[in-house]
């Protein structure tokens, strides 16, 4: 997997491209150098060469590119368009995961209709009250039904918050 954090990118496609090329280069040195040399695609011929570079990545295994904090660059339409084009190529061994605090401004309807895009939102990741109860039990914490309801409501089912509360309960806080 290639992990790309967009912290400090300031919405710049140049910084995005530099970070992406560097991370790709850790797994695929030649491709990383080629992407860095090509630069962020500014015209159709350059876009074709960049997409070909991604298509030529070693296909013996899947490559997952995780772009963290995508909301920090989501206002940059050029990056959005590039990613849409790359996804629409449907390269068989390339998968892109966008982690964002907001819904990306990609043309999701087009991508969903072609089964090229899946969305997992906070409701999908949130624990139900029953799952919170099971987790607390697993952690060795007992909670009354009233406390369980308070914990579930307060945390919204987010496991990291439930973990911190469980840790506090175990310490007597």
Image (spheres, grey):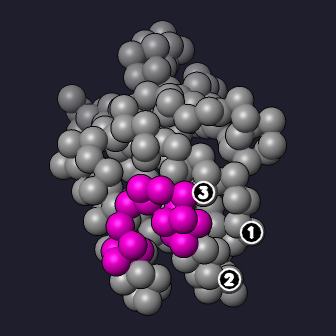
Query: Which is more toward the observer, 153 or 126?
Result: 126
Residue at the spot x=59%, y=46% of the render? Answer: 84
Query: In whole angstroms, how far apart are the C-alphas of marks 3 and 1?
Result: 12 Å
Query: In whole angstroms, how far apart are the C-alphas of marks 1 and 2?
Result: 8 Å
The magenta-colored residue range is: 35-51
Residue at the spot x=40%, y=23% of the render? Answer: 155
Query: In whole angstroms, how far apart are the C-alphas of marks 2 and 3?
Result: 16 Å
- Taken as a whole, is the magenta stretch helix, strand or loop? helix
Q: What residue did someone put label 1 on?
A: 92
Closer to the camera: disc 2 or disc 3? 3
Count up the numbered dots: 3
Q: What residue did someone put label 3 on?
A: 86
Q: Position of residue 159 (x, y in %)?
A: 45, 37
Element under disc 1: loop
Q: In this view, does 100 lie to the left or right of 116?
A: left
Q: Is residue 27 left or right of residue 19?
A: right
* Mark with earlier residue (3, 1): 3
Q: Report if residue 112 is visible in the image.
A: yes
Residue furthest to the right in view is: 114
The image quadrant of residue 2 is: bottom left
Task: Check contact, mark 1 vs mark 2: CB within 8 A.
Answer: yes
* Mark with earlier residue (1, 2): 2
């Amino acid at each position: 997997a290639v992990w790309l954090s967009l912290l400090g990118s300031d919405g710049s496609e140049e910084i995005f491209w530099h970070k992406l090329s560097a991370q790709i280069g850790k797994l695929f040195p030649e491709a990383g150098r080629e992407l860095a040399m090509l630069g962020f695609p500014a015209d159709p011929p350059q876009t074709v060469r960049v997409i070909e570079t991604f298509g030529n990545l070693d296909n013996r295994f899947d490559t997952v590119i995780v772009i963290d904090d995508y909301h920090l660059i989501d206002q940059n339409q050029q990056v959005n368009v590039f990613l849409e084009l790359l996804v629409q190529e449907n390269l068989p061994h390339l998968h892109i995961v966008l982690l964002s605090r907001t819904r990306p401004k990609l043309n999701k309807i087009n991508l969903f209709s072609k089964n090229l895009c899946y969305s997992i939102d906070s409701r999908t990741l949130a624990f139900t009250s029953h799952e919170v109860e099971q987790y607390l039990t697993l952690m060795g914490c007992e909670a009354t039904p009233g406390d369980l309801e308070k914990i579930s409501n307060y945390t919204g089912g987010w496991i990291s918050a439930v973990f911190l509360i469980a840790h506090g309960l175990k310490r007597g806080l």
